[in-house]
Amino acid sequence: SSYLIHNIIMTGKCCAVPNQLGELDLRCQNLTYIGVKRILAKLSLRGYTNIQKVDLSGNENIGDIGAVCLQLIPPTVSEVDMSYCNIGAVGLRHICDFMKSNTNIITLSLAGNRFDEKCATCLGEMLRENNTLQVLRAYQYGDGEKRFKYYYNSSFWFEGVVEGLMYNHTLRVLEMVHNTHDMDKVALDAFNHVLCNGGGSAIERLCIGRVRQSFTFQLSLNAVENLGRTGVADYINRITLQLPKAEDSFGKLLSNLFKRCKNLYDMNLTRWLEHPHQHPHAREVQYWMELNTVKARQITEDGEFAGFVDSLVEATHSDLFDSIFYLVRNNAHQIPKY
């Protein structure tokens, strides 16, 4: 069967070839651990040293046993995709144990596998010890969506990860929940606590669910769930009474989060911010997000003229007027006088 982009496997032989960009495309080829091992061994014998990315996604026969094939990846590889490989808690344990000391892989995608709350603990332990990984995608959707929602609404799914994130200062992108899921208050509270206390200091994009205009209603469900369900009508009335308080609390929390975390600029808030006049503190949230997008505060603290210029150019191209004003006001002393 033929591969996309120069990847070929012939019966009895393994001669997959990376393309000119160093990408080894092995997607959806019904590979097992043995198949991956043969391909990588053959490439090693043939002297291929330019492999930078290995895509194993969609090979469901890899499973828990085959997850150890990550250890066979050449040291030149910086990006690995093992999404939809039917990996569960046992397989993820192998992956995380390997990643704890790995210093080469920068991007790791594990989306669409059979993760449960035990997996969050493994991921947290790995994040605590790994000092290289910058992008981690561990969300799940599709066939596992219904089952995953149970864990998503469970604090256990986040507790293990945030405990490890507290000690991690290299991860830039963390995608724990696909953006088709709505954000949960448990998730927001957990990550807010970690990020505002110095953990995950390099985080720029944090995907823990989608925030919609109806998030206030969701937040209220959490806030009043202990009041008792004495009837649907009474329950809804109680929720309605909580809406203003919940909305105000949510806005303050987000504003404080983006203010404290100078690198964080994306939490999938697009829908929530579509009508900022409807949400208290929305303007504050937008302001801090905008500054963080071009790292305006970090660059100002560093005092580097080159960084200031790059940030100003980026802010100008993106029409980020608050960032432009902030950069010029706080870095005017760096502008050469002729």
Image: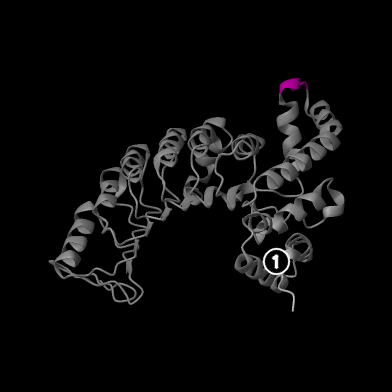
Residue position marked by numbered label 1 in the rendering: 334
Looking at the image, residue 76 lies above or below residue 174: below
**268 relative position to 249: left or right:** left
Asked whether 227 falls inside the magenta stretch, the response is yes
Q: Where does the magenta region start and end?
A: 226-230
User: Where's residue 63, x and y in %?
Assistant: 31, 47
Q: Quadrant of the C terminus?
A: bottom right
Q: Nearer the viewer, residue 119 or 112?
A: 119
| Amino acid marked by disc 1 | Gln
- Disc 1 packing (10 Å; few <14; some 14–19; many ≥20): some
Looking at the image, residue 190 lies above or below residue 316: above
Dividing the picture into quarters, in which one does residue 328 lie? bottom right
**67 relative position to 170: left or right:** left
Q: Residue at x 26, y 44 (%)?
A: 65
Dividing the picture into quarters, in which one does residue 293 lie? bottom right
Mark 1: secondary structure: helix
Residue 59 seen in this snapshot: yes
User: Where's residue 196, x and y in %?
Assistant: 64, 38
Residue 228 seen in this snapshot: no
Q: Nearer the viewer, residue 89 or 254?
A: 254
User: Where's residue 336, x and y in %?
Assistant: 71, 73
Q: Residue at x 62, y 56 (%)?
A: 302
Q: Residue at x 48, y 45 (%)?
A: 144
Asked whether 166 falls inside the magenta stretch, the response is no
Q: Residue at x 36, y 48 (%)?
A: 86
Looking at the image, residue 125 lies above or below residue 143: above
**237 relative position to 161: left or right:** right
Looking at the image, residue 229 lies above or below residue 84: above
User: Where's residue 31, x and y in %?
Assistant: 26, 58
Give the dominant element type of the magenta stretch: helix, strand or loop. Answer: loop
Asked which colour scheme the image uses, the reply is: one colour
